[in-house]
Amino acid sequence: MPSDASTATLLGYARARPRAGSLDEQIDLLTETGVAANRIYTDTTVLPEAERPGMTALLDYARRGDTVVVVGIDRLGRSTPEVMSTVRHLGERGLRLRSLRERIDTTEPAGHMIVGVLASLSELDDEQSPGRRVSTGGARRAGGTVGRPRALTPDQIAQAERMRANGEPVPRIAAALGVSRATLYRTLATKEAR
C-alpha cells in the first residue's frame, strides 16, 4: 500500500463497552501510543442497532495510508461480522490497522496475515447454519456454557492478574498456574474486554 510515511496520520477509535460507559481508559491508551487527542474518534452507544457517528467521522477524515489505532480489535464492532466488515472496509480504503491488545499491525506481514485469518474465520462463522447459532444462544440464555470448560478458576485468574500487575512475565505466570501461555493470554484478554 504505497504512502508517504511522513504524511500518514494515526487515527484513534474508541467505542464504549457494555457495563463500562467511560472511554477514558481507551483514550488514555491511544494518546500514550502517539495518537493526537484531536484525532481520536469515539462512539458511546453499545446498542446493536445504533449508528456509529464516531466511526463515520473517522472514515470521512481518513486518507489512504493512515493508521487506525484501537485498544482491542473488538472495539471495531459489536459482533464478529461487524468487526470483520469494518476491518475489510479499512483495508479496501487503503487504511492500516493497529490493535494494541492483540499486537496486530497490518503494516507488518504477520499482522496482515493475522487479519486475513480472522477474516477467513469470520466468513466461516457467517456460513454457519442458523439453527446452530440459535442453539448455542439458547444454551447461554439458559445459564449453560458453550465450548470447552474454563481452564482457570476465578481465584487463579485473580492471582494471574496480581502477578501481571507486579510485573511478572506471562510465561512465568503460566508455568506457576500450570496452563499454556495462550490460555493465559486469552483469559487476561477476556477479562480486559469486559
Image (cartoon, rainbow, N blue to C red):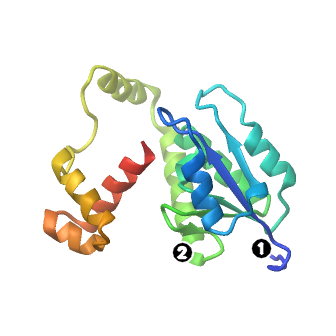
Where residue 100 sits in the image (x, y, percent)? Answer: 54, 63
Q: Position of residue 62 (x, y in %)?
A: 83, 57
Check the picture and name the quadrant holding the C terminus: top left
Residue found at x 26% / y 59% = 162
Residue tagged by mark 1? Answer: 1
Q: Which residue is mark 2?
A: 110
Q: Position of residue 178 (x, y in %)?
A: 13, 64
Residue 126 percent across, percent down from the top left:
53, 39
Q: Quadrant of residue 66?
A: bottom right
- Looking at the image, residue 140 lies above or below residue 62: above
| Residue at left offset 28%, top offset 57% | 161
| Residue pictured at 83% horizontal, 65% vertical | 64
Sort mark 1 into few (<14), some (14-19) or many (20+) by Cα contacts within 10 Å: few
Against 26, is 66 above or below? below
Residue 37 - label: none
| Horizontal relation, residue 57 to residue 190: left or right | right
Between 128 and 34, the residue placed more toward the observer is: 34
| Mark 2: amino acid | Ala
Q: Element under label 1?
A: loop
Q: Secondary structure at mark 2?
A: helix
Q: Can you see residue 83?
A: yes
Give the amino acid at mark 1: Met
Q: In whole angstroms, how far apart are the C-alphas of marks 2 and 1?
A: 15 Å
Camera-side residue: 126 or 147? Answer: 147
* Placement of 133 over or under 106, stated as above or below: above
Above or below — where is 140 with respect to 81?
above
Q: Is residue 25 left or right of residue 154?
A: right
**Quadrant containing the N terminus in the rendered view:** bottom right
Where on the picture, by quarter, is residue 11?
A: bottom right
> 10 Å neighbourhood of mark 2: few (<14), some, or many (≥20)?
few
> Based on the displayed image, in which of its 4 quarters is residue 65 positioned?
bottom right
